[in-house]
Amino acid sequence: MCSPGIWPLVAGGRGGAGPKPTFGIGRTSGIIAETRALLPKICALAEWEEGRVRPLDVLVPKGASRRKNDVCVRHSWGRALPENAVIRLDEGVYLSTPEFAFLQMANSLDEMELAILGCSLCGCYYPYEGPTGFVRRPQLTTIKRLYGFLAQFRNVKNASKARRALRWVHEGSRSPMETSTAMLLSVSRRMGGYGLPKPMLNQIVDLSAGSSEIAGTPYYVVDLFYPKSNVAVEYLGQAYHKDVDRDVTREYVLRSEGCTLFNVTITQVVTSSLRNRLVMDIARAIGYRLRKSTPAISEKRNAFLNRILPHRSQIMKSGEVVWKSAPWAVPPLRLD
């Protein structure tokens, strides 16, 4: 009931609220057999390859056996289910909502891992055990909804950790690279980032009538945006250079609208000297005073960036990044 890999199914609108299941009373046995019996139905609902699905994470009442098996990993919950904790997918199949699962995942993830998970839940992509490492899908929740759900829990284990992680979560990210770029800019120096203000992700920038005529659109959507200072950061990924005329026009129009534009490549992000120069320029453009680094801060930053940025071995010649699958990634989909 807390398996993160099935969350994209929620975004497809196939789940429903329905009655909340009875939980926490007398259910201490038969869980493995029941999960095994339901596995084909769950795989069919999620369009997974049944033979390649790793054990499902399921929620069990306090006192139930948590013996290891090849079907499920059981997590104990010793109280009544909170409001908005689960949705009904099918008869006998309930799924933790993104908000409840975020709280549960705080048991096994640290603060930064939770923040990365939060960015995917509040974004438009999800880790996937496939060639690129992620798939696109609709946004599942918001930072406000996560905060609201966690407000129910004052003395629940790891609820405080989950709330702390939300400080570094961004909404609207469309890829792991956008998440990593936003986090390296805005996570505090104490945690290993550069400590700049949080940018808005995939923000609409309205164009004037003249610029709209040139661009052929009334607005652009920019990857990272600081609205107060009108500063945009565009990540030039795999699609860059496929339509040079369009890219040149986009840059010209944004600059003519008074927008300070930074085009960023994967090389700039993963190369220390280029990245430091880029961050200094962005900080200056938004009017933020960037403090000098210390050996201790540099050490924390290296450790942090090693966690959130791709290794050079994951970067293709085209600039495409092949992301490693996260522990909560979607299993391979069934190919009919």
Image: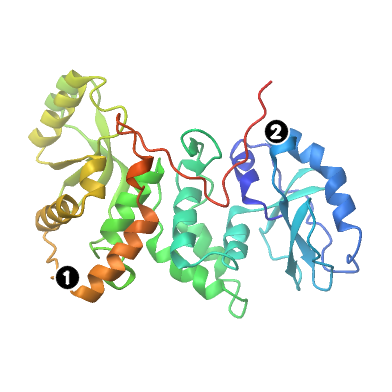
Q: Picture quarter containing residue 169?
A: bottom left
Whether 223 is drawn above or below 273: the answer is: above
Residue 91 visible in image: no
Whether 137 is drawn above or below 74: the answer is: above
List x then y, in percent, for residue 90. 79, 41
Q: Which mark is residue 150?
A: none
Which one is nearer the viewer's eye here, 261 or 215?
A: 261
Q: Check disc 2 and give the amino acid type.
A: Glu
**Rendered residue at 69%/46% (across/down):** 54
Q: Check disc 1 and give the amino acid type.
A: Ser
Helix, strand or loop at mark 2 = loop
List x then y, in percent, for residue 287. 11, 60
221 vs 98, left or right, is left
Residue 103 visible in image: yes
Q: Badge 1: how crowded within 10 Å, few (<14), some, or many (20+)?
A: few
Asked if labels 1 and 2 touch by Cβ distance under 8 angstroms, the answer is: no
Helix, strand or loop at mark 1 = loop
Residue projecting furthest to the front: 313
**Rendered residue at 62%/40% (across/down):** 331
**Rendered residue at 67%/28% (across/down):** 334
- Cα separation between marks 2 and 1: 48 Å
Q: Which mark is residue 49?
A: 2
Badge 2 or badge 1: first in the primary sequence: 2
Whether 248 is drawn above or below 49: the answer is: above
Q: Picture quarter containing residue 105?
A: bottom right
Q: Which residue is mark 1?
A: 293
173 vs 21, left or right, is left
